[in-house]
Amino acid sequence: MGPAAEPRDGAPVDAPRCPRCARELAVLEVYSTRNRWGGGPPRLRQEQWWQCPAGDWLGYRHADGDPLRPVRRLAGAEGDCFFCGDEECNVAGVPWQQEDGSWHDWLVCLSCGTSNPRRLRFPPPPDGAPG
Ligand SMILES: [Zn+2]
Ligand SMILES: [Zn+2]
């Protein structure tokens, strides 16, 4: 056995591994800051957000042991938050198709924590979708 791992302050014991490079993911704290001004301080979003220290993966999961769900950073105007005005702070989850054939994804601002489903004008490119 090697030397005992020292617990680090605030670090979760079971940090998941990066799906791309297998590094231990780092916690990314995403706070909801909107609509809090009469009512309290920013509040952590319910999901656990993670990012790879190598910068090649970003995503979240709903709870310990849940599958990790990747998001992608949006660039340009699409990445600018409509609500808080920060630039290139929006990320989007994996698109899904509804029964009527329309595509949707989930948009989250990492600056103010606002999330919204949105309808995509174009279907996502097929590459990168296994199966
Ligand atoms: Zn990685
Ligand atoms: Zn925002």
Image (cartoon, helix red, strand yellow):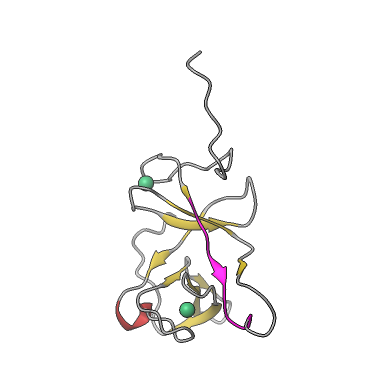
Where in the figure is residue 1, as x and y percent of width and height?
51, 13
Quarter assignment of residue 125:
bottom left
Where in the figure is residue 77, as x and y percent of width and height?
33, 83
Residue visible at 45% across and 63% down in the picture: 71
For the residue pair 45 and 41, the one nearer the viewer reads as: 41
Q: Is residue 108 magenta?
A: no
Residue 56 at least partly seen: yes
Quarter assignment of residue 128:
bottom left
Where in the figure is residue 74, as x and y percent of width and height?
36, 72
Q: Quadrant of the C terminus?
A: bottom left
**In the rendered structure, which segment of residues is drawn in magenta?**
27-36
Where in the figure is residue 28, as x and y percent of width and height?
49, 57
Residue visible at 38% across and 81% down in the picture: 80
For the residue pair 12 and 78, the one nearer the viewer reads as: 12
In the rendered structure, the answer to whether residue 8 lies left or right of residue 54 reads right
Residue visible at 47% across and 41% down in the picture: 17
In the rendered structure, the answer to whether residue 86 lies left or right of residue 47 reads left
Q: Is residue 29 magenta?
A: yes
In the rendered structure, the answer to whether residue 125 lies left or right of residue 116 reads left
Residue 102 at least partly seen: no
Magenta stretch, main secondary structure class = loop
Number of numbered markers: 0
